[in-house]
Image (cartoon, rainbow, N blue to C red):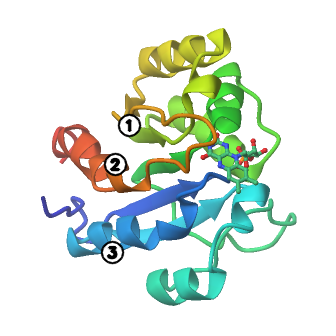
């Protein structure tokens, strides 16, 4: 899949990164997106920032990582998003997003994306004890109803080291492709 907007400019993908075990590998999604002709900017949750090599990501994307709200009057650090991939998404951010809570910049962007009609995908990465909480199933149902495209990662066992080898970063791009080709 190679993406191009009607204006001929490269489309812009926001990758929203939460504080989950695989977050440090987000460069893999950035590379895959850039190979498909996206420009990419990273928005991290405040907790997620601690999982990232900010210097490496900023060198790779050419943009500062956003995590906090800008001050009034400050220029917008990133162009507007043509699509959003939340990867990895935590239990915490999935539940807050579905409930309409907007207490991080990442959540603020996600909560508004629905109303702005921005194609959005989420790749949750969590364990089966977290996924068993009834709120999580309700959150996924809510996000699905909002048109959010949900990744297929099967939660790993708690305290068992995670499932990074099964986490398919490229799935975010595969899920977004039909939504984007319908718009061009
Ligand atoms: C080393 C470490 C790994 C973590 N991995 C996960 C994870 O894979 N999935 C998850 O939902 N939470 C995980 N957590 C818990 C989240 O970091 C925590 O809930 C945090 O508040 C999430 O913040 P955020 O949703 O704003 O990024 C982890 C915490 C630590 C310290």
Q: Gap between marks 1 and 3, in whole Å?
A: 20 Å
Residue name at image x 62 percent, y 41 percent? 90
Which circle's residue, 1 or 3, is located before the other in the chain? 3
* Residue 146 sits above or below residue 178 on the image: above
Viewer-proximal residue among 71 and 55? 55
Position in image of residue 56 (x %, y %)? 55, 87
Position in image of residue 154 (x %, y %)? 40, 32
SS category of the residue bearing label 2: helix
Residue name at image x 18 percent, y 39 percent? 178
Q: Would you identify the image quadrant in which residue 153 lies?
A: top left
Residue linked to disc 2: 166
Position in image of residue 146 (x %, y %)? 47, 20
The label nearer to you, 2 versus 1, is 2
Q: Gap between marks 2 and 1, in whole Å?
A: 7 Å
Which circle's residue, 2 or 1, is located before the other in the chain? 1
Is the N terminus in the top left, top right, bottom left or bottom right quadrant? Answer: bottom left
Which circle's residue, 3 or 2, is located before the other in the chain? 3
Viewer-proximal residue among 177 and 71? 177
Q: Would you identify the image quadrant in which residue 66 lies?
A: bottom right
Q: Gap between marks 3 and 2, in whole Å?
A: 18 Å
In this picture, residue 77 sits left or right of residue 47: left
* Residue 172 sits above or below residue 150 on the image: below
Residue name at image x 50 percent, y 86 percent? 62
Disc 2 and disc 1 in contact, CB within 8 angstroms: yes
The label nearer to you, 1 versus 3, is 1
Dot 3: within a 10 Å radius of its alpha carbon, few (fewer than 14), some, or many (20 or more) residues?
A: some
Residue linked to disc 3: 31
Mark identifier at residue 153: 1
């Amino acid at each position: 899949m190679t993406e191009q907007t009607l204006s001929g400019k490269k489309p812009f993908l926001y990758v929203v990164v939460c504080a989950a075990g695989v977050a440090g590998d987000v460069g893999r999604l950035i590379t895959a997106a850039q190979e498909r002709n996206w420009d990419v900017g990273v928005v991290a949750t405040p907790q997620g920032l601690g999982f990232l090599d900010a210097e490496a990501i900023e060198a790779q994307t050419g943009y500062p990582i956003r995590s906090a709200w800008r001050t009034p009057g400050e220029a917008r650090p990133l162009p507007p998003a043509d699509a959003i991939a939340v990867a990895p998404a935590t239990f915490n951010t999935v539940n807050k997003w579905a409930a309409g809570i907007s207490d991080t910049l990442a959540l603020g962007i996600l909560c508004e994306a629905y109303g702005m009609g921005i194609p959005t995908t989420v790749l949750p990465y969590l364990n089966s004890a977290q996924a068993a909480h009834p709120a999580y199933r309700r959150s996924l149902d809510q996000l699905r109803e909002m048109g959010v495209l949900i990744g297929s990662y099967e939660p790993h066992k708690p305290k068992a080291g995670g499932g990074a080898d099964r986490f398919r970063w490229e799935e975010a791009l595969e899920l977004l492709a039909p939504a984007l080709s319908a718009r061009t």
